[in-house]
Image: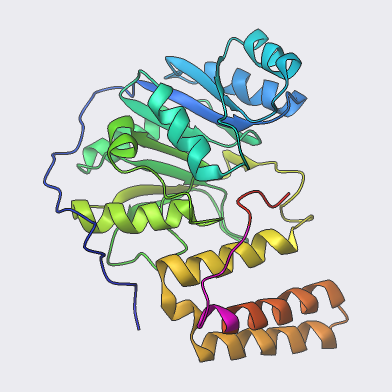
């Protein structure tokens, strides 16, 4: 079984890609505390060769003091609606509040090289594309790697990433991120976009994109984050990922981690195998926030 079929709710879209010489965008950042890293992220955005017209912080802190700290950064503070935090909802309210034609969705712990946004946008435009996103390089990768990601090479994991992505604002408003899709809302939205518009996005893997999440990275990782992502992708994006062979592969990886005396990794793989098996019979439920 390949990627899940296009639901009837996906209308055919024929809109031409947005075109502009330099990117005019507002940066939407989701945050609940004002950290030194967030300050560095904001400074880095303003230092871009094509800086944002606006910086919008979707504030889920519920604290007037924290909101004031965000305002002191020169940001437009967008209060998060009442209720449990949901990444999709945070992005959606940020896009609605953004008056610029493009929205840069960027995490509060991501730093981009000063030329990346302008260069990435121009490279995407040269290929008739209106979306560009950035990722750190893969282990062992030397230099930058850039290519078109579309329906042909989308596997449910490698689509437009909400870690750092430049997207036409109206596209998000017209078809918001689905709130019930926990942890893989960007991959589900990618699936929608590639199918509905029939074109791809520009993917850039570069060491100039630094992912500095203190809760999840090369040296520190969240078991719950990995599990949630695997479940969400398997259920909402590519059901091939929860088929028996994938479950068996997880069990084997757990056995290998056990042999290598890596009990936390083994626990993760065995836990994923069990959860993926259950997901074949019951829609998984999980919180959008996993830290």
The image quadrant of residue 103 is top left
Where residue 226 sits: x, y (%)? Answer: 65, 63
Asked if residue 284 lies in the magenta stretch, the reply is yes
Residue drawn at point x = 74 percent, y = 84 percent:
254
Q: Relative to 228, is 90 above or below?
A: above
Q: Nearer the viewer, residue 4 or 26?
A: 4
Q: Seen in the image, is 36 located left or right of residue 135?
A: right
Residue drawn at point x = 43 percent, y = 66 percent:
236
Tell me which segment is drawn in magenta: 278-286
Q: Relative to 14, is 27 above or below?
A: above
Q: Relative to 104, is 284 above or below?
A: below
Q: Relative to 159, is 237 above or below?
A: below
Where residue 179 sits: x, y (%)? Answer: 47, 49
Where residue 227 sits: x, y (%)? Answer: 65, 67
The image quadrant of residue 126 is top left
Q: Seen in the image, is 51 located left or right of residue 8?
A: right
Q: Nearer the viewer, residue 118 or 231?
A: 231
Q: Main secondary structure of the magenta part?
A: loop
């Amino acid at each position: 079984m390949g990627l899940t079929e296009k639901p009837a709710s996906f209308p055919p879209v024929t809109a031409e890609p947005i075109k502009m010489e330099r990117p005019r965008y507002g940066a939407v950042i989701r945050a609940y505390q004002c950290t030194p890293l967030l300050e560095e992220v904001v400074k880095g955005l303003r230092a871009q060769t094509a800086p944002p017209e606006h910086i919008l912080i979707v504030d889920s802190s519920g604290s007037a003091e924290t909101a004031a700290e965000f305002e002191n950064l020169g940001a437009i503070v967008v209060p998060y609606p009442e209720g449990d935090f949901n990444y999709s909802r945070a992005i959606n309210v940020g896009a609605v509040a953004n008056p610029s034609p493009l929205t840069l969705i960027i995490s509060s712990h991501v730093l981009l090289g000063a030329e990346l946004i302008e260069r990435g946008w121009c490279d995407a435009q040269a290929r008739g594309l209106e979306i560009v996103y950035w990722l750190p390089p893969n282990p062992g990768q030397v230099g930058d790697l850039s290519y078109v990601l579309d329906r042909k090479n989308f596997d449910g994991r490698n689509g437009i990433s909400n870690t750092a992505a430049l997207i036409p604002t109206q596209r998000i408003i017209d078809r918001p991120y689905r709130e019930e899709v926990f942890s893989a809302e960007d991959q589900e939205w990618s699936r929608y976009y590639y199918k509905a518009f029939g074109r791809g996005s520009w993917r850039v893997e570069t060491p100039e994109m630094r992912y500095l999440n203190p809760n999840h990275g090369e040296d520190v990782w969240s078991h719950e984050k990995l599990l949630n992502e695997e479940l969400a992708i398997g259920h909402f994006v590519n059901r091939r990922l929860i088929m028996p062979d994938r479950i068996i592969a997880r069990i084997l990886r757990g056995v290998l981690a056990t042999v290598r005396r890596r009990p936390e990794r083994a626990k993760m793989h065995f836990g994923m195998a069990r959860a993926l098996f259950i997901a074949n019979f019951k829609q998984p439920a999980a919180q959008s926030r996993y830290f």
